[in-house]
């Protein structure tokens, strides 16, 4: 039992952390506003506690300590505003939030009376929540080590104060109990929460990604296409949909076997992924040997990308060379179809599919373009 627990913990700790997936699929769309509000409000709670403690007999004493707390208070208000009104943050911002949250919180708590310092460590749960939902297990462990160290330290500090009879409203056992409870709340809960969150996230990830290639499947591409359409429409950009189908793929399976056929599909997906990444587009495997590509930008550049796909995917040096048929539906920025709304996405995909079949009927290894 212990061996299994140790192995599971090791797997959790060493698991690769896909921040892009977390940002795009855990925090965006309907949850974006909620998460902004939660972290903005939580940061303001930091500031509120700082304000209240300025007027407490258990708060900071001396001009230097008060000035430092006021400075930290100003930083907390600025961070709260950034959470609510700023753009969606990147990974460095989250890591910075964690580091400064832990360090600044500790620097303020040290200035408080021992019992107030111990109680105030519950604020570490806010940065713990940040780690739980957005950052890697390794950063969570670093945060928890920091948190546990100072909870125990403040607990010992308070215990010594109590045992010296400097405090008459609490006793030693109560301090020890409070320390254990704070450790459970701020250290134990985030670990269990992240393990559960990661498990649910992996299930969600598997539901929208093709297991063979790692690109989106039909279910996963739908919301991405709508987001891409919105992006292009709001910036008056052109948009292109391309259906890419491997020519004569059945003969590959018949001659080399399905395992080698899968290798060909993975190779095609990898090359498409590299091409599409430079265009800021999306890619999905929508059938056995069929892929859907959607990109936005300059119309000429997207047409060039279509020809690049045909050229790059056909490489005679491959152990199993293949060609592809590509059909493109080009929606220029001045097209009247932008006015019909997101329903144009489905129409464009069907148009690209029809164009792909015309490419295949003409012998394959070519690009057919339809403007809509």
Image (cartoon, helix red, strand yellow):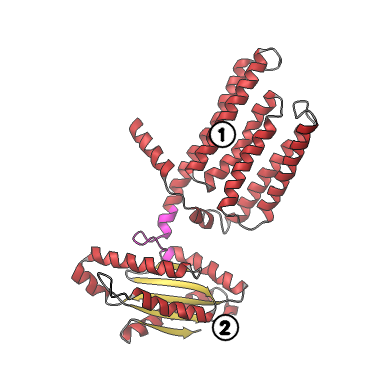
First to last magenta residue range: 204-219
Mark 2: secondary structure: loop
Provide the residue designation for mark 2. 335
Relative horizontal placement of residue 30, taking residue 115 as reference (left or right): left
- Quadrant assignment for the N terminus: top left
Label whose residue precedes the other's in the sequence (1 or 2): 1
Q: Which mark is residue 146?
A: 1
Relative horizontal placement of residue 28, taking residue 162 as reference (left or right): left
Mark 1: secondary structure: helix
Q: CA distance from mark 1 to mark 2?
A: 57 Å
The residue lying at 46 percent from left, 42 percent from top is: 195
**Residue 329's spot in the image, x, y percent?**
47, 80
Q: Is residue 105 visible?
A: yes
Q: Which mark is residue 13?
A: none
**Residue 91's spot in the image, x, y percent?**
55, 52
The residue lying at 39 percent from left, 79 percent from top is: 326
Which of the 4 image quadrants contains residue 206? bottom left
Residue 275 lies within the magenta run: no
The residue lying at 30 percent from left, 77 percent from top is: 247
The residue lying at 52 percent from left, 53 percent from top is: 26
Q: Is residue 299 above or below residue 197?
A: below
User: Circle 2: is it few (<14), some (14-19), or many (20+) Cα within 10 Å?
Assistant: few
Q: Is residue 323 above or below residue 158?
A: below
User: Circle 1: is it few (<14), some (14-19), or many (20+) Cα within 10 Å?
Assistant: some
**Residue 260's spot in the image, x, y percent?**
24, 65
């Amino acid at each position: 039992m212990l061996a299994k627990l140790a192995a599971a913990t090791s797997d959790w700790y060493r698991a690769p952390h896909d921040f892009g997936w977390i940002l795009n699929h855990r925090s965006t769309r309907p949850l974006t506003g909620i998460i902004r509000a939660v972290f903005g409000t939580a940061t303001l709670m930091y500031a509120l506690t700082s304000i209240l403690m300025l007027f407490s007999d258990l708060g900071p004493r001396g001009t230097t300590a008060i000035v430092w707390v006021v400075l930290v208070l100003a930083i907390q208000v600025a961070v709260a505003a950034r959470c609510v009104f700023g753009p969606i943050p990147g990974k460095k911002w989250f890591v910075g939030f964690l580091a400064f949250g832990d360090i600044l919180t500790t620097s303020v708590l040290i200035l408080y009376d021992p019992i107030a310092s111990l109680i105030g460590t519950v604020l570490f749960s806010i940065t713990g929540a940040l780690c739980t939902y957005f950052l890697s297990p390794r950063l969570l462990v670093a945060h928890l080590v920091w948190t546990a160290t100072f909870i125990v330290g403040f607990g010992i500090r308070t215990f010594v104060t109590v045992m010296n009879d400097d405090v008459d409203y609490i006793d030693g056992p109560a301090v020890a109990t409070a320390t254990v409870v704070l450790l459970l709340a701020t250290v134990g809960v985030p670990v269990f929460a992240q393990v559960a969150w990661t498990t649910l996230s992996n299930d969600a990830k598997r539901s929208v990604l093709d297991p063979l290639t790692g690109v989106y499947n039909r279910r996963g591409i739908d919301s991405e296409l709508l987001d891409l359409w919105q992006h292009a429409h709001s910036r008056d950009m052109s948009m292109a949909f391309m259906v890419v189908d491997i020519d004569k793929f059945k003969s590959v399976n018949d001659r080399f076997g399905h395992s080698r056929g899968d290798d060909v599909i993975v190779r095609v997906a990898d090359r498409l992924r590299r091409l599409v990444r430079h265009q800021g587009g999306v890619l999905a495997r929508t059938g056995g040997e069929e892929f859907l590509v959607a990109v936005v930008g300059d119309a000429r550049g997207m047409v060039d990308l279509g020809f690049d796909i045909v050229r790059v995917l056909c490489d005679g040096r491959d152990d199993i060379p293949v060609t592809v048929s590509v059909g493109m539906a080009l929606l220029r920025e001045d097209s009247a179809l932008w006015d019909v709304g997101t329903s144009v996405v489905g129409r464009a995909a069907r148009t690209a599919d029809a164009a792909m079949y015309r490419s295949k009927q003409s012998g394959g290894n070519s690009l057919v373009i339809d403007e809509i």
